[in-house]
Image (tube, coloured by chain):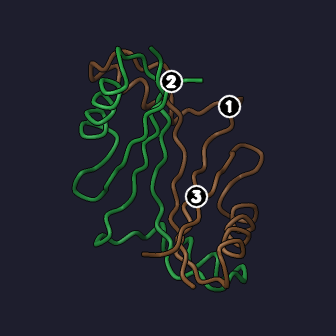
Chain colours: A green, B brown
Amino acid sequence: MNFVCEVYIRPRADILDPQGDAVLSALGHLGFEGVNEVKVGKYLILKLTAPDSSAAEQAARTMCEKLLANPITEDYTLKVSTEA
Amino acid sequence: MNFVCEVYIRPRADILDPQGDAVLSALGHLGFEGVNEVKVGKYLILKLTAPDSSAAEQAARTMCEKLLANPITEDYTLKVSTEA
């Protein structure tokens, strides 16, 4: 079966995020008020073939740990759905 | 009130995504099978103060259009929630 696995990777709360700070500063220069914090992470969409949903999730989790996310500086969450 | 606005930005379906292709290739070299496509986008977490949820969403949408997303090459979706 074909699955779509969405991976949401964000900087850990206690890690400096200079990219987020740059976006926050740019929003301020553009006149946007009321923005208190910005964090910039990655959003990956994987299309993969697996026997079932839990195998797809496990495969995606392993990919995150081996390649996609940096476990020292980033947290990630996954959402697996059947490909439409 | 304080809101958390999560922004999911992805390359449009008909746009080449070399970063996604690079990740797909790297996953193959690491021995992951069954991955058919990878798209790499951005995941932003904005903390902002707004009178209500719909004002927060409207502000975030304007930020996407002015700065965060490239409307020519990217699609985005938003999720607004109350800050815990």
Give the alpha-carbon distance from disc 2 to disc 1, as whole Å: 11 Å
Q: Which residue is mark 2?
A: B37
Q: Mark 2–mark 1 contact, CB under 8 Å? A: no
| Circle 1 Cα neighbour tier, 10 Å, few/some/many (<14 / 14–19 / ≥20) | few
Q: Which residue is mark 3?
A: B7
Please, is residue B7 above or below residue A33 in the view? Answer: above
Residue B13 image offset from top left, x and y in percent: 68, 31
Q: Quadrant of residue B41?
A: top right
Circle 3: residue type: Val
In this rendering, which labeled residue sits more in front, label 3 or label 1? 3
Is residue A68 found left or right of A5 in the rendered image? left
Circle 2: residue type: Glu
Q: Do the residues marked 3 and 1 share a common chain?
A: yes
Q: Quadrant of residue B60?
A: bottom right
In this rendering, which labeled residue sits more in front, label 2 or label 3? 3
Dot placed on the residue nearer the N-terminal end, 2 or 1 = 1
Please give the name of the residue rendered at 44% of the width and 14% of the height, measured from the top-left corner.
Answer: A1
Q: Which residue is mark 1?
A: B13
Give the alpha-carbon distance from disc 3 to disc 1, as whole Å: 18 Å
Is residue A13 found left or right of A21 in the rendered image? left
Judging from the image, mark 3 belongs to the subunit labelled B
Give the SS element for disc 1: loop
Residue A4 image offset from top left, x and y in percent: 49, 29
Circle 1: residue type: Ala
Give the SS element for disc 3: strand
Please, is residue A47 above or below residue B8 in the view? Answer: above
Dot placed on the residue nearer the N-terminal end, 3 or 1 = 3
Judging from the image, mark 1 belongs to the subunit labelled B
